[in-house]
Amino acid sequence: MRIHFCRLNAIVLTLFLGGFISLEAQVNNREREDSRTADTFENPPRLVVGIVVDQMRYDYLTRFWDHYGKKGFKRLIGDGFLSKNHHFGYAPTSTGPGHASVYTGTTPSGHGIIGNNWYDKYSDSGVYCVGDTSQTSVGTTSNAGQHSPHRLMTTTITDQLRLHYQMRSKVISVAIKDRGAVLPGGHTANAAYWFEGGAAGDWISSSHYMDDLPSWVQQYNASNPAERYKQVWKLSHKPETYVESGPDNVPYEGVFSGETSPVFPHDLPALWAANGGYDLLKATPFGNSLTLDFALEALEKEALGADEITDFLAISFSSTDYVGHKYGVNSKEVQDTYIRLDEDLERLLKELDRSVGEGAYTVFLTADHGVSPVPAYLSEAGIPAGYLYKNKMRERLEEFMSFTYGTTDLLKAFSNNQLFLDHDLMRNLELDPEYVGAQFAEELLKYEGIYKVYTSGQMRDGSFTEGIEAVLKNGYNQKRSGDLILVPPPAHIDYSQTGTTHGSPYIYDTHVPLIFYGKGVARGSTVRKTYIRDIAPTLAVMLGIAFPNGSTGTPIAEVLE
């Protein structure tokens, strides 16, 4: 009995000591977490760099991996955090909605940017996502600067950063595309700059941000920095090493005016006049390089990241989209553009290390949408794919309206795969809009090229949590979207028979990379499904600032160190 009693005492003592040690370990862990949290709040990154690569599919990371150097994409992923299963979670997937969603932490249903362009049912006219005729151009005599974020209905993470620091934080946004600069900058950016091509080749802005270009921008434009990229576009590596892409000369790739076939090399000086002068650079990897050149100039001249108040530099690389549209996913042009982008990322990180300090800045990289493979290429490979012929569809729909309602005027507009009906006319004809919408849907489902049709009532009232229906609902804005939403079959696009496009709810348009790197970021990866609307909330938690006011995303906990 004494032996059993001693053993019992030993067990109790072990359990007690184990519990004490476990409790002590928990306290130590909590203290370490509190210390890290305090360090984040007391010593946030001096600079956040947001990178959006226009039209970057996730598989561009994996397909071209062996061609990337060690200090671009590979550095970001190896020392940062990669979300491998990252999606938009809404449609339409295009540049305006993409940039807005990255920076607002919500989807078009919340922020209101439902397309690059859309039909406005209240003004009965087409509108551009950042077009604003109340503004004047700055840095040009053309109307290319008449833009602002006035159609963006919520704040951005960049707005919240400015508000948090009583407008002492600097926010600068740069892109070739105006919408790629305006929307990331939000409502309160110090400046947003975009590239005017043609004969100018200058960086310009809008009166929404400033009355005149800063002297450093004027001096930069005067030096004509884009001129150095007026050169022959050759493959970066030996042609035979581009085994990740298809043949160079195929009939479903586009050509520049003056070319007879879509093959390397592309002689830009010889093609210059016939392709809009400096506009030609947009559809080459040199457009990304000149974007980075200007962004680095802004980094230096605006002294971004120079003090303890967090600044924000938003960079959108637009040329990947222009190249992708012209040549398609399987082209050597796309592959070479990403190889060169990798070199630009290395150049960016090197300069951030030098000017801000390694470990003092945070970077995220994502895309504004993906893209479909060229349907002609897929058909050649034996995969179902095709094109939409909306003119024929509209002719048939007019016959239906004439026969059913005695008029063809019920259809007011066809925009972003959405139909807008004339509600005033329906009231005059004493027609129930819900019933008419259902009749239109039933008719449209008979048409070749239409896979699914949803009415505004279904989008408004449906409780969709997964599948294409949920994706469409997240893109549906009650105030701005149409009466019917059309979904083509997979791999079917409304585009020319060369090149390709995007905009659908399918996975090739929604699956994009998301990489976080730098201060406050844990090393690792996840295959858990994350969404574009999660980026801004993750940054907000990291920076200790308020979420954008329309945010519906969830912070990605695994990213946070």
Image: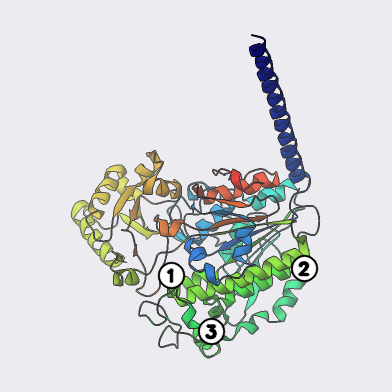
Q: Is residue 141 visible?
A: no
- Nearer to us of marks 2 and 3 is 3
Task: Depth check: give the residue in front, 279 or 532.
Answer: 532
Q: Which residue is mark 2?
A: 301
Q: Mark 1 or mark 3, which has the lower sequence index?
A: 3
How far apart, in angstroms, are the residues tagged by discs 2 and 3?
A: 33 Å
**Residue drawn where x is 65% and y is 15% of the image:** 8
Image quadrant of residue 3?
A: top right
Residue of label 1: 329
For residue 478, above or below residue 279: above
Compared across the picture, whether 507 is left or right of 315 comes to left
The amino acid marked with disc number 2 is Lys
Judged from the image, the secondary structure of the residue bearing numbered disc 1 is: loop
Q: Is residue 464 left or right of residue 42?
A: left
Q: Which residue is mark 3?
A: 234
Where residue 277 appears, as percent x and y from the top left, is 56, 83
Q: Residue at x 51, y 48 (%)?
A: 530
Q: Mark 1 or mark 2, which is nearer the start of the sequence? A: 2
Tell me the amino acid under the disc marked 1: Val
